[in-house]
Image (cartoon, rainbow, N blue to C red):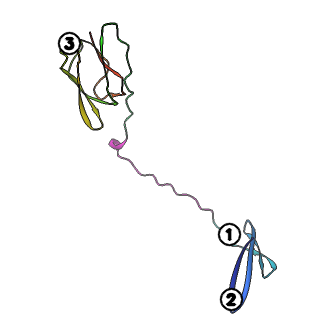
Amino acid sequence: MKEYKYKINGNDYTVAVGDIEGNIAKIEVNGTPYEVQLPEQPAIKPVVKRVPVAADAAPSAPKPAAKKVAAAAGDYVIESPLPGTIKEIYVKEGQQVKAADVVCILEAMKMGNEIHAGKDGVVKSINVAKEDSVLEGTTIMVIA
């Protein structure tokens, strides 16, 4: 029981509130028990408001990240040095490249990173596409 002390018109009252079942409260005032009928409370219904969303604001489904690919013996594999998004690809399969050539741009942490061929040769395969998300170690290209 929770007890409260009141002074009303110069008189002291000790009020103890006991169990409340439904709309009936059991209380004691200066040791005398009473049952007090409380007013019925209407059930509170939650209100759900639907707000229209612009069609272009809806997120598009994320593209799956490219995977690591096994290369044949003697092939040179260009791997992503860090997680990011492929923003540009400057070569095509079958194209001759020099080690210093920039083959693609990887955006990571809002910075464009040039990815170089790393070896003279021919682009054997390109394993990513523009706007693909890649993880660190993902095979970007294979050079033979």
State which mark lies toward you, 1 or 3. Answer: 3
Mark 3 neighbour density, 10 Å: few (under 14) some (14–19) many (20 or more): some
Q: Quadrant of residue 140?
A: top left
Mark 3: which secondary structure? loop
Q: What is the quadrant of residue 115 in the picture? A: top left
Q: Secondary structure at mark 2?
A: strand
Residue at 50 percent of width and 54 percent of height: 48
Q: Identify residue for label 1.
A: 40
Q: Is residue 59 left or right of residue 115?
A: right
The answer to if 82 sits in the magenta stretch is no
Alpha carbon separation for disc pair 1 and 3: 85 Å
Amino acid tagged 1: Glu
Q: Is residue 58 above or below residue 47?
A: above
28 horizontally vs 104: left or right = right
Task: Give the position of the N terminus as an image quadrant.
Answer: bottom right
Tag 3: amino acid? Asp
Q: Which mark is residue 120?
A: 3
Residue 41 spot, x, y in % from top left: 65, 68
x and y, in percent, of residue 124 in the image: 27, 11
